Image: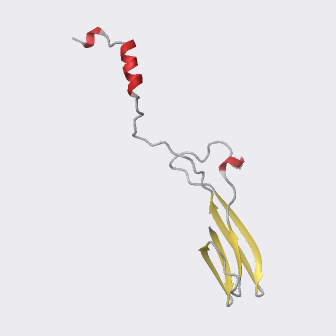
Amino acid sequence: MGNLYEASNGHMVARQSKVSLPWLDRWSMSCESDIVASTGFFKGRQFMGPESTSPSIEVYIAGSFSGTPIILTKTSLLGLWKKHARKGLLDSIPEYEATEDQKNNPPPRDMYI
């Protein structure tokens, strides 16, 4: 999904759209981001941490419409889609490993007193 810029009856309209309607008398431009974090575009860990914002890329396109100069801009946020570890959850201990560990390493004697 991206922004769709449309010109109809001399007016410029920007809206979110998945498809354009070719049977209407207008032109359109769709802007989408194809950059992902694994492509090497980002280096280091400068975007890590809860207070940091997602990186973005801004695109400018200049042209004219009906003799009027126009400049189209589009800012796309580039999400890193990183799986975050869930905080506050304990790892489970399988029962077999726990009972085997107790057989091999009994608790110290002073725990029985």
Residue 46: which quarter of the image? top right
Q: Where is residue 4 in the image (x, y as percent from the top left)?
A: 65, 75
Q: Residue furthest front?
A: 96
Q: How many labels does the image show?
A: 0
Residue name at image x 65 percent, y 74 percent: 19
Position above or below: 58 against 81: below
Quarter containing the C terminus: top left
Does 49 sit left or right of 21 as displayed?
A: left
Question: Residue 38 at x, y = what percent?
Answer: 68, 47
Which x, y percent locates residue 40? 71, 47
**7 lies above or below 96:** below
Q: Nearer the viewer, residue 63 or 90?
A: 90
Residue extending furthest top? 109
Q: How was the colour assigned to the protein in this rendering?
A: secondary structure
Which sits in the foreground, 41 or 68?
41
Residue lying farthest to the left in this orientation: 113
Apparent side of residue 37 relative to residue 61 in the rendered image (left or right) = left
Point out the image quarter for the N terminus.
Answer: bottom right
Observer-nearest of 52 and 110 = 110
Residue in the picture at 71% in, 74% down: 29
**Residue in view at x 68 percent, y 68 percent:** 31
Left or right: residue 69 compared with residue 110: right
- Examine the rendered structure and indicate whether residue 17 appears above or below residue 75: below
- Most distant residue in the bottom direction: 9
**Residue 106 rendering spot, x and y as whole percentages:** 34, 12
Q: Residue at x 62, y 77 (%)?
A: 14
Looking at the rendering, which quadrant does residue 8 occupy?
A: bottom right
